[in-house]
Image (cartoon, helix red, strand yellow):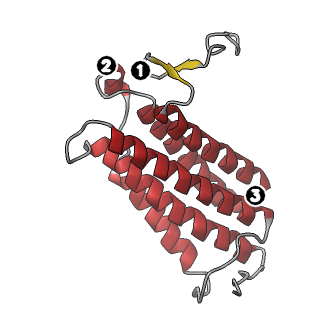
């Protein structure tokens, strides 16, 4: 299979559900941000050692979740393709919460704002966090433009909750990566 098809040369691309839309469509922007986040996490994995295999495995599970989220964002609700998608279950959100709690047990109490940075892995986790927040904003914006009445369907609600919790996880992960390298947080001094 060829990587290039030429079908996007006029500024349009296909959604998972088959519709052709402009490349600056809100759906494309939303799952593009999720894809960017996934790429940063892949880069972060490359900075982790084999002794941090448990973190690598956590992040790889998150990457799989992000592909699933991207598929939801690339599928219109009226499409038959939506039947092929799996909702993000509550257990995936709980997985993030448990991982946050486990890392936080080792971290000193935060007494102010911190500057993003430290080790390379921590810097990438902070970068991933900011892209996650942007993706969350795009997804919320997309959901606000779709016609669902006052309530989003459960699978779409869980996407927003997942991204919100993921940004929390990434913040704690950044701090935890610095902790593993014995590098303290840098407090912001105004």
Q: Nearer the viewer, residue 3 or 140?
A: 140
Alpha carbon separation for disc pair 1 and 2: 7 Å
Q: Say whether disc 2 or disc 3 marks the residue closer to the N-terminus.
A: 3
> Quarter holding the C terminus?
bottom right
CB atoms at circles 1 and 2 under 8 Å apart? Answer: yes
Where disc 3 sits, the SS reads loop
Q: Nearer the viewer, mark 1 or mark 3?
A: 1
Q: Label 2, on which residue?
A: 80
Residue 48 — which label?
3
Residue 189 position within the rendered picture, expressed as x and y whole percent measured from the top left:
71, 87
Residue 149 position within the rendered picture, expressed as x and y whole percent measured from the top left:
20, 42
Where disc 1 sits, the SS reads loop
Disc 3 crowd, CA 10 A, few/some/many (<14, 14-19, 20+): some
CB atoms at circles 1 and 3 under 8 Å apart? Answer: no
Residue 17 — which label?
1
98 sits to left or right of 147: right
């Amino acid at each position: 299979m060829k990587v290039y098809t030429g079908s996007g040369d006029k500024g349009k691309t296909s959604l998972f559900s088959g519709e052709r839309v402009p490349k600056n469509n809100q759906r494309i922007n939303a799952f593009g941000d999720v894809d960017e986040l996934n790429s940063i996490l892949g880069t972060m994995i490359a900075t982790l050692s084999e002794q941090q295999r448990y973190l690598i495995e956590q992040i790889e599970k998150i990457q799989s979740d992000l592909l699933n989220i991207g598929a939801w964002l690339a599928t219109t609700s009226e499409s038959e393709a939506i039947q092929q998608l799996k909702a993000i279950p509550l257990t995936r959100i709980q997985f993030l919460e448990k991982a946050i709690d486990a890392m936080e047990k080792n971290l000193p109490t935060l007494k102010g704002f911190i500057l993003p940075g430290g080790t390379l892995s921590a810097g990438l986790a902070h970068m991933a966090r900011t892209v996650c927040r942007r993706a969350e904003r795009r997804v919320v914006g997309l959901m606000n433009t779709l016609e669902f009445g006052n309530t989003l369907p459960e699978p779409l609600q869980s996407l927003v909750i997942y991204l919100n919790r993921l940004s929390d996880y990434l913040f704690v992960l950044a701090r935890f990566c610095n902790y593993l390298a014995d590098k303290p947080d840098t407090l912001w001094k105004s």
